[in-house]
Image (tube, rainbow, N blue to C red):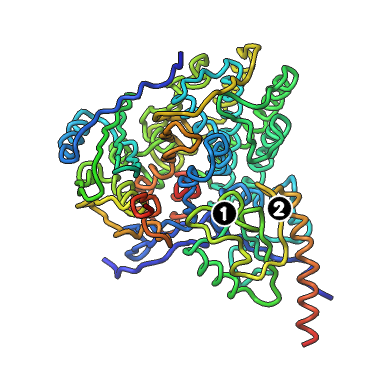
Amino acid sequence: MYSMEEQKIIKISPDEILAETVDLKNAGYRLVAISCVNKDGIELSYSFDKDYDFVHLRVNMDYDTEIESVSCFYQYAFLYENEIKELFGVKIKNITVDFNDNLYRISVKTPFNMKEEE
Amino acid sequence: MGKRTVIPFGPQHPVLPEPIHLDLVLEDEKVVEAIPQIGYIHRGLEKLVEKRDFKQYTYVAERICGICSFMHGMGYCMAVEGIMEIEVPERGKFLRTIWAEVSRIHSHLLWLGLTADAFGFESLFMHSWRLREEVLDLFEQTTGGRVIFSVCDIGGVRKDIDAEMLNTMVSVLTRMEKELRDLTDVFLNDMSVKHRTVGVGVLSKEKAQETGAVGPMARASGISVDMRTLGYAAYKHLQFEPITAEAGDSYARMEVRIGEVYQAIELIRQCVELIPEGDVITKIKGNPNGEHFIRLEQPRGEVIYYVKANGTSFLDRFRVRTPTFANVPALLETLKDCDLADVPILILTIDPCISCTER
Amino acid sequence: MNFNKKSPWILHYDGSSCNGCDIGVLACLTPLYDVERFGVINTGNPRHADILLLTGSLNAQNIPVVQQIYDQMPEPKVVAAIGICATSGGIFAECYNVVGGVDKVLPVDVYVPGCAARPQAIIDGVVKALSILDEKQNALKGR
């Protein structure tokens, strides 16, 4: 059988994100990446790692939901969050360093946002 | 306390092979803060999954970056294999490992050269790149390409390396190892090199954790994290330990990367001894449906691939988080309080790959 | 006597290339290919440069940068597009943040094909650029 890393995806709701993140932070996990899929709603995956234990928090939400930034716990999350905000048009509030959609300064507005194409 | 001045650095700068822009806030000669501005290389290739089917996309994934091109292709393939539950034949896994390790040697030699160039040691740059060309010749002999190989495919690899060539690789690398010793002796022991690197840009272990540093950047600060220990491809059959250093300065980062060059040669030797006979690729049927996260250790550190598929031949999403992206906060940390003259070296010690970062 | 042709100085700028071609350009300067034996010197200063080597395609953000570098170079000057991305956008032509090849903005004199362009091809391109540089110089004299 396929012998790759186990995929541990924990589903949470948008308002649980801060509580879940702080738990992982206190347990010594490091934030590995924040990924976003924008298709039939927004799906955010927060990936964490501690001693090669790879865990993902999964948030599914609709386009209008605002989500809290985790940059208050993981300062370096600001890069991921700015990227997601700019490319996907996800509403993230309270990012510690907010580039206001000017991280990549691309010519197209939120190119990964499928909603506008419909 | 002096007056504050902002100096723009980049995008076109003699020391930068790639464009990145930093606004350096200075107080006299000391950098107080560095504000990055990226986006000069952003192409948006992640969105190409809508225009290329998942098999064609292997070739796009390889072109995320022309330095770790093989590993990008491999990571993407592994993610799709993870979704489709394809087991790559053992020989294919070993060949992937060999090419990945040769890539590591080539990438680290490239970095050593660029760093030497950054601290103004031109002949060291030339010698590093002279040796690197021999590594590229190995690529060319085995894959047909110098930079982009297109040998990795979903299900395995598209080319086999015969026993004779494998032995040639080992003998070339063994001969190179001797020359490398001469080269790395200079890097590690030369007074003028030490003068520019020892104690420059110290990143403590705590700061490295706080900024989420990965790869040699983290290992040079005493964090023993190396994704190869997960045992993907053929790494589970190989004997190795992550190479770490404690000091966390530019010299330590150089030490770690130099150690990894020798480690890579050793790993290739082990692979050539252990490689089994057999197929190198399995045929795949159907389209992927599902999602998968994959982590690899690239020369620059940990990389994450995420693929989400919907059962058609076009993927929903491909995401890559590259090591330089994760190391940018650590770079900004080391830039604080450094001398303006050290900025080029500090930028280079994270081994930046901007085209990976911005995709 | 035309001095530019004897020792052209090149300037390299990475548009949005994947590094493959950039490293090809740099590899040209290193011992195996060693274009310095022909008098070619890589400079970081646009004011010193005769030949501009551009790798990678253009996007909205780097167009002003490329334009500025070109304007800063003294006449006569030659532009060479290195690799397929600089020629037409290549594999990334359909990406949303790619405008296209270098010739959308600058007059390109030499196109070097390849993904990634091989150092031999790049040297060949530079040699072709030299004769164009020569022509341009003569035209300037005649003016």
Q: Comparing marks 2 and 1, which lies closer to the viewer?
A: 1
The numbered mark 2 sits on a residue in which chain?
A: C
| Residue B213 image point, x, y percent | 36, 39
How many numbered circles are shown? Answer: 2
Q: Is residue A104 above or below residue C70?
A: above
| Residue B174 image point, x, y percent | 67, 24
What residue lies at 51% left-to-right and 61% top-to-bottom? C59
Q: Is residue B145 visible?
A: yes
Task: Determine which quarter of the picture holds residue B221.
Answer: top left
Badge 1: few (under 14), some or many (20 or more) residues near its Cα, within 10 Å? many
Looking at the rendered structure, the kind of residue marked 1 is: Ala
Residue nearest the viewer, comparing B13 with B229: B229
Callout 1 secondary element:
loop
Q: CA distance from mark 2 to mark 1?
A: 15 Å
Check the picture and name the quadrant holding the N terminus of chain B.
bottom left
The furthest residue to the bottom: C143
| Residue C56 image point, x, y percent | 59, 55
| In the image: residue B326, left or right of residue C12 | left
Badge 2: few (under 14), some or many (20 or more) residues near its Cα, within 10 Å? some
The furthest residue to the front: A118
Looking at the rendered structure, the kind of residue marked 2 is: Pro
Callout 2 secondary element:
loop
Q: Which mark is residue C113?
A: 2
Q: Are marks 2 and 1 on the same chain?
A: yes
What residue lies at 69% left-to-right and 69% top-to-bottom? C50
The numbered mark 1 sits on a residue in which chain?
A: C
What residue lies at 43% left-to-right and 20% top-to-bottom? A4
Looking at the image, do the residues carrying marks 2 and 1 touch, with CB atoms under 8 Å apart? no
Q: Is residue B167 above or below residue B203?
A: above
| Residue B314 image point, x, y percent | 48, 38
Q: Tell me the residue that label 1 is attached to.
A: C93
